Amino acid sequence: MAKQFPHIEDAHRKFIEEQHMFFTGSAGVEGRVNISPKGMDSLRVLGPDRIVWMNLTGSGNETAGHLLEVNRMTLMWCSFTTRPLILRAYGTAKVLHAGDNGWEDLAALFPAHRSARQIFDVSVDMVQTSCGYAVPFMEYQSERDTMQKWVDGKSDADIRAYWEEKNQTTIDGKPTGVPVAVKETHD
């Protein structure tokens, strides 16, 4: 049976921190709904109503585009090990880019990554757990090194050029707000 909670409890935080991946869900006013898997030590629970996650360069940038229209976001984790559980955190989010106020403090929470595109700062207003009985067992082996190899083969200018070519609009043609040039820090 699904249960709702007004905030992230200690048991929820522990469960979240044990997972190797999570999923994000977002949607604009119109167009496609986006669901995306994330990993690579890119998420931190900062309190009972706050989660931040660093978004690394990828082939799309749907979440950022959706948040320019509607700032709602859902994060989801599911256990692939012995304890069946699905946990969703519902809330609203804001986007920070390098050079924005607060970027440096939040970026310091994560391993340094040259392809960090945004940090999403999520205000959680509800947590829901459900059974997860139909989620299959899967064994974690390791993180992929594909992203790091891609980044190692690129200069910072190459990464920004990729953002300009591939990450300026959503698949529905809406802007994402990702800057091509890094702004000066204003902290």
Image (cartoon, rainbow, N blue to C red):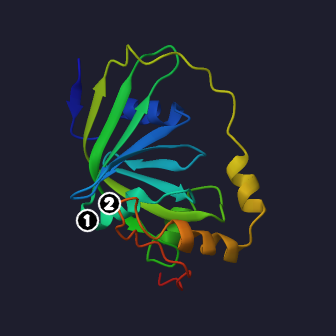
Alpha carbon of mark 2 to alpha carbon of mark 1: how far? 5 Å
Q: Which of 113 and 44 is in front in this view?
A: 113
Residue at point 23% right, 17% down? 1
Q: Which mark is residue 66?
A: 2
Q: Where is residue 120 in the image (x, y as percent from the top left)?
A: 42, 59
Residue at point 66% right, 65% down? 114
Q: In this view, does 187 lie above or below 5?
A: below
Tell me, yes or no, if residue 8 can be seen here.
no
Residue at point 39% right, 15% down? 134
Q: Position of residue 159 (x, y in %)?
A: 65, 69
In the image, what residue type sits under mark 2? His
Q: How crowded is mark 1: few (under 14 residues within 10 Å), some or many (20 or more)?
A: some
Secondary structure of the residue carrying tag 1 is helix
Q: In this view, does 122 lie above or below 81?
A: below
Residue 17 lies left or right of residue 35; in this view the side is right
Q: Where is residue 146 in the image (x, y as percent from the top left)?
A: 71, 47
Q: How crowded is mark 2: few (under 14 residues within 10 Å), some or many (20 or more)?
A: many
Residue 135 lies left or right of residue 56; in this view the side is left
Residue at point 32% right, 60% down? 66
Secondary structure of the residue carrying tag 2 is helix
Tell me, yes or no, if residue 59 can be seen here.
yes
Q: Nearer the viewer, residue 121 or 9?
A: 121
Q: Residue 69 carries which label?
A: 1
